[in-house]
């Protein structure tokens, strides 16, 4: 674990666009990458099954399908993202309790301000939240 999220600009733009599209409900999704690489590559927007402005939940069927797809491609969820629509981009107690991927970067985007967004990344391991720097790289590699 590097302690830094390195992510391409177009992936950040996709996440923010998804968060704005789903506002006032929370948006959620995954960015998959090759197993063992810590490199976010493939953007996978998910449906917030809760359809809630204060809570997100992956649909269990969608989640099962996602993990089968990741296994088939030798990929892992490098980034798990969701939005907060009325609060800062910091994990809630519920977010922490649902965090089950110790190697993932948990990205939060706040869409509370329509003029700008907050984009922050965390590691959540055993209930402990650690913010990490985000390094946004240029266009495509």
Image (cartoon, rainbow, N blue to C red):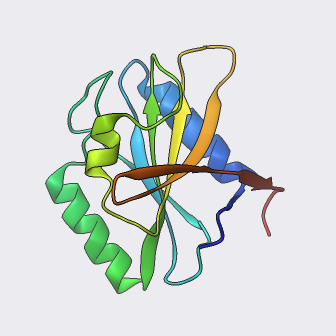
User: Where residue 39 sits: x, y (%)?
Assistant: 62, 71
Q: Is residue 99 left or right of residue 39?
A: left
Instruction: Work out which quarter of the rendered image holds the N terminus and state it.
Output: bottom right
Residue drawn at the location 50% of the way across and 36% of the way down: 18
Residue 117 lies, with reference to residue 39, above or below; the image says above
- With respect to residue 11, does 94 lie above or below? above
Residue at 42% across, 27% down: 22
Task: Please indicate whether residue 78 sits to the left or right of residue 25 in the image.
Answer: right
Residue 131's x, y, as percent?
Answer: 59, 48
Quarter residue 57 falls in: top left
Outermost residue to the left? 61
| Quadrant of the rendered image containing residue 118 | top right
Measuring from the top left, give residue 24's x and y in whole percent. 40, 18
Residue at the spot x=76%, y=52% of the render?
Answer: 136
Q: Residue at x 37, y 34 (%)?
A: 92
In this view, the residue in front, 140 or 57, is: 57
**Considering only vertical position in the picture, is 91 above or below 3?**
above
Q: Position of residue 110 (x, y in %)?
A: 54, 27
């Amino acid at each position: 674990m590097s302690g830094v999220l390195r992510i391409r600009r177009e992936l950040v733009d996709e996440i923010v666009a998804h968060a704005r599209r789903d506002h006032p409900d929370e948006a959620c999704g995954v960015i998959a990458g090759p197993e063992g690489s810590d490199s976010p590559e493939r953007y996978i927007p998910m449906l917030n099954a809760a359809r809630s402005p204060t809570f997100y939940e992956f649909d269990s069927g969608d989640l099962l399908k996602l993990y089968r797809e990741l296994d088939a491609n030798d990929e892992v969820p490098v980034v798990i993202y969701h939005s907060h629509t009325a609060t800062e981009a910091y994990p809630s107690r519920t977010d922490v309790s649902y965090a089950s991927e110790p190697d993932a970067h948990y990205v939060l985007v706040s869409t509370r301000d329509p003029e700008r967004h907050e984009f922050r990344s965390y590691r959540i391991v055993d209930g402990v939240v650690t913010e990490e720097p985000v390094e946004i790289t240029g266009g495509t590699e």
